Image: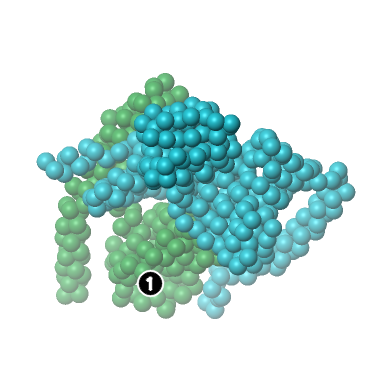
Chain colours: A cyan, B green
Amino acid sequence: MEEINNSNHIPYHLIMDELEGKISTTDLQELESWKAANPDHLRSYQEILDIADHSELLMVYKETDPEQAWQRFEPSIPVETRIVSLHPQKKKGLPFLKWAAAVMVLISGAWFVANQRGWIGEETVRTGNEHQKLVLPDGTEVFMNANTTISYHKSGFLNSRNVELEKGEAYFNVIHDEKSPFSIKVGELYVNDLGTSFNLKVEPEQVVVVVNSGKVALEQGKETKKILLSAQDRGTFNKVTKEMSAVKNEDLNYKAWHDKTLHYQQALLTEVSDDMKELFGTQIVFQDSTLKERKLSAYFKNKSEEEIMNTIGETLRLKVTKRDGTFVLSN
Amino acid sequence: MTNKDNELIEGICRKDKQCFELLYKGHYKKLYVLAFQYVRQQEMAEEIVNDVFLKVWNDAEQLNIKQSLGPYLSRCVINMALNSIKKESRKAANEVRFLSGYEEYEEESDAAQILENKLIRLEKALESLPPQCRKVIMMSKFDKCKQQEIADALNISVKTVKSHLTNGYEKIRVILSKEQVLFFFLFLLSAVELRLLHLINVL
């Protein structure tokens, strides 16, 4: 009986959304807490992922034709001699590869020069106090926060998708193209995207990347140092120590400036006040310092500064008064 | 199975290409899907399996015939797959996942055979589902359709797609977990049977 109950409560809809890579932050949290609630849950979850993965493998398996594979393979089998090297076909392929590589280098060199000549110059986009949406030649969307500078080469962009974020903050919605990686340069750090959406912010001492979906790689200069971030990971690059690190993102509102959505689960009012200040420039004064410790659970989407403040007041039964552009919260 | 493989290996030692062809075609599918499970790329998976078979063709005499061929081939494929993943450093995440799994991998077992059995069981479980439900699952995994795309294609609501997915996965999960126990015993039984056959042959 117990077991039947358990299986009936598997949140399939959440897992399916997760598999499709379009799960919302709230749903993901719900799923995570379900997984953590009981070891059996985790096991069921793993079983479902296995079924999904194996279904994919099953397709590959069924489409495989040993007959055709043999036809392709047969010519590479060495015929007579018994003293043969381990991978004869590879050795034969090597000089060809070298030539191919040389030709590729020449071609790409030629491309590069052609591009250089064709350049009208660097395109630089700066925002002041406003936000701006920038659509790059490949269709990638960049939502720029205020005081942000982004530059890229206009004509060469489709050949090498390189963008430089000089300062500020931006939310990227990158069009995936396996053949052409998307790379953002931030000082010494390269943020290489593997087809995804993420938020990138340059702070005085560090660069912060929060991934919403897909995968992102952080690479340092030409060195091999590299970390890979998945959805809901937060990666930082310390400009001083040059250290990179990754943790699970706990700030639900990292892209509030972009999607105008604020989401709180038992968050301290001081935290809310900081977000409001960043988002609207709202000044909040707590009449009693114990009020700062009060906790809020709420969800705001496309709400104005005043609407949010009023909701906070109603939820926590506080008095909200506005004086000279400053909100005062009192009991 | 083992006996037939042994005969084929003997043939390969004599450079009998027909024996090689039979061995190749007999093992290709499961080794290919095993390689694919690691590298997730069709061409690379094929290359890996072919390299393993070339090794068999070239070094057949040095193969230890006493050990059965299946586990040996699986191990070669896995090792080669891991090596090529290492080379492709951009797949760092996968590598970590598989390397950690690999440490627990028993040398004696035949990974390709185990995977093939699982896939065949999964196929049977899929076949036991109601047609529409099966279709939704196949579209979501085989054709990699999004829920919305499936809904549009079949002219049903996303909610219905979701409920098909839920019911389908749940049924498969129950069927497979029930079978797991049964198959373990069948596996033991067949192992004993093989040993017996082998004994009779020896006598």
Looking at the image, which is closer to me, A280 or A254? A280
Residue A304 in the image, given as x and y percentages of width and height:
53, 28
For mark 1, what is the residue?
Answer: B10
How packed mark 1 is, by other alpha carbons closer than 10 Å (few <14, some 14-19, many 20 or more), is some
- Residue B168 appears left or right of B40: left
Residue A47 in the image, given as x and y percentages of width and height:
29, 48
What is the quadrant of the C terminus of chain A in the image?
top left
**Which residue extends farthest left?**
A1
Chain ID of residue with mark 1? B
Residue for point 29% across, 45% down: A34
What is the quadrant of the N terminus of chain A in the image?
top left
Looking at the image, which is closer to me, A217 or B126? A217
Asked where in the image residue B147 lies, by quadrant, the reply is top left
Residue for point 85% across, 53% down: A113
Looking at the image, which is closer to me, A223 or B20? A223
- Residue A267 appears left or right of B90: left
Q: Report whether residue B109 is seen.
A: yes
Q: Report whether residue B146 is seen.
A: no
Q: In this view, does A24 lie above or below A112?
A: above
Q: Which amino acid does the dot numbered 1 rest on?
A: Glu
- Residue A270 appears left or right of A157: left
Residue for point 24% across, 46% down: B176
Asked where in the image residue B154 lies, by quadrant, the reply is top left
**Which residue extends farthest top?**
B155
Residue for point 46% across, 45% down: A270
Residue A124 in the image, given as x and y percentages of width and height:
77, 43
Residue A171 in the image, given as x and y percentages of width and height:
60, 42
Q: Is mark 1 on a helix, strand or loop?
A: helix
Q: How many marks?
A: 1
